[in-house]
Every structure is written in C-alpha cells, then in structure tokens.
Image: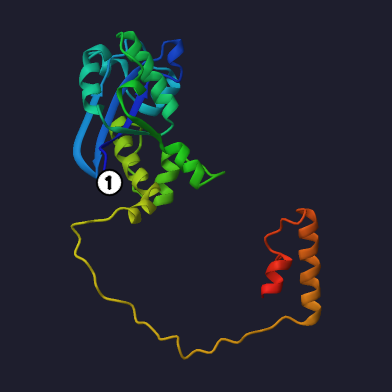
Amino acid sequence: MSRQIVLDTETTGLNPGSGDRIIEIAGVELFNRRLTGKRYHTYLNPGRASHPDALKVHGLTEEFLADKPRFAQIAAELLEFVSGAEIIIHNAPFDRAFLDVELDRVNLPAFAQHVPMITDTLVMAKMQFPGKFNNLDALCKRFGIDNAHRTLHGALLDAELLAEVYLSLTRGQDSLVIDLEAPQQHALAPTQALEHFILPVIAPSTEEMRAHQSILAKMDKATTGKSIWRPSQAESSDA
C-alpha cells in the first residue's frame, strides 16, 4: 500500500488572499494503515499578528513565534517529507489555499503538484454522515476517539487525531486487503446435504396465465414484436 501523510496547519486567520499566513505545520506518516512514528512538525514566524478569533483557537502568540523560522526556510524539508505520499487533510481546500500562497511566495509550484494525491476527510465524512456535524471534534466523539486533551487547536495533535479518524472512516476497506502473512484458517462451516429436500412446484392458475399473456402481448406491441419475453411462433411450435 502507498505511503500516506496526514497533514494539518494553523494560521493567523481565514484568508490567505488578504495576507494571513501559516504559523504551524504538522504531518504524521501512515504506512499499511499504521502510524510509523515518523512526523514533521514546525512552528513558523508569520511576520504578522494573528486575528483575535484565530488566536483564541490556537493560542500561538507573536512573542512565541518571534524566533521561529520563516516558511522559506522550511519549504524544502516539508516538500521532501511529503514527496510521493498521498496527503490526507480535513477540509483540504483551506490548507491547500494557504500552502499554495506560501509556496508561491518562494517561487515554487502549487502544493498539489508536489504530491500524487490529496484526500479530503471532510468530504468522506459528509458522504458517510450527511446532515451531521463533521468537524474533527464531532468525528472523534462519533468514533470514540479520545480528544479530551485537545483544549486548543494544534497542528501536530490535530494531525494525530485526524489519522485515527481517517482509519475509522476507512475501516470497511480493511476487508479488501489480503494479509499474506496471517496464518491460514482451514476450518469449514458445517454443511447440510440438500438432495433429500423436496421443493414444491406451484403452477399458475388459468386466471394468472391469462394475466401473464396479456402483459406479454402489451410488451410485444410496445416493442414492435421485439420483446425477448414473448417466444416467437417458431419457438412456440418447437416447444
């Protein structure tokens, strides 16, 4: 199976077009549907203050971020980490928009051009649970994933939680994967011979046969004699 990276970002606000920037990026690696322990995580100095509402969500102050690297300093190592992997993001258009703007600032192609595939777990969740809340907290509660320690949004914690959510969303796919290393089970379910069973044959009544022939005649007329359910005269004479 392919390598997957579950990715999340935190930002100064909601609109990269108006100058909002990424302040935290994290990714955790899945391989064969298991967390490998490999991860990428960094805080970034955005060069601007966070919107007050965003600050309430992530709690990352200007003072804390002042000595952190700029995106240009980490772009290469981020792209190296995600290279060749399917990327899993919750509400992917949001994170992609920010990543695209940051990459454009350093004269690099859009994020989707660096990876083979991007999967949006929000789209998956809406398909499985239409009409329900499908944010990360709601999905954790729905799947019984402990997120009590998530008092503030953080990219690394959210990526780890999202990895568990993704595995829960796709759990039904496990049955499609053959584990070649698993011991083979040869026990057979008990069987019962059927040759002694006598199945009753129920013939249609004359009235039922007339109704059946009437329906066939209508079908034959509607298809100008091409109905496959009404035998031709030659076939009837052979019967």
The percent position of residue 192, horizontal first and vertical second, equals 40, 85
The percent position of residue 77, horizontal first and vertical second, equals 20, 21
For the residue pair 17 and 187, the one nearer the viewer reads as: 187
The percent position of residue 35, horizontal first and vertical second, equals 23, 43
Q: Is residue 80 above or below residue 120?
A: above
For the residue pair 146 and 28, the one nearer the viewer reads as: 28
For the residue pair 140 and 204, the one nearer the viewer reads as: 204
Residue indicated by mark 1: 33
Q: Residue at 32% of width from left, 45% of height from top? A: 164
Q: Quadrant of the N terminus?
A: top left
Q: Residue at 51% of width from left, 47% of height from top? A: 129
Where is residue 72, by image quadrant? top left
Q: Horizontal placement of 207 versus 54: left or right?
A: right
The percent position of residue 24, horizontal first and vertical second, equals 30, 23
Q: Quadrant of the C terminus?
A: bottom right
Q: Horizontal placement of 150 versus 200: left or right?
A: left
Give the SS element for disc 1.
Answer: loop
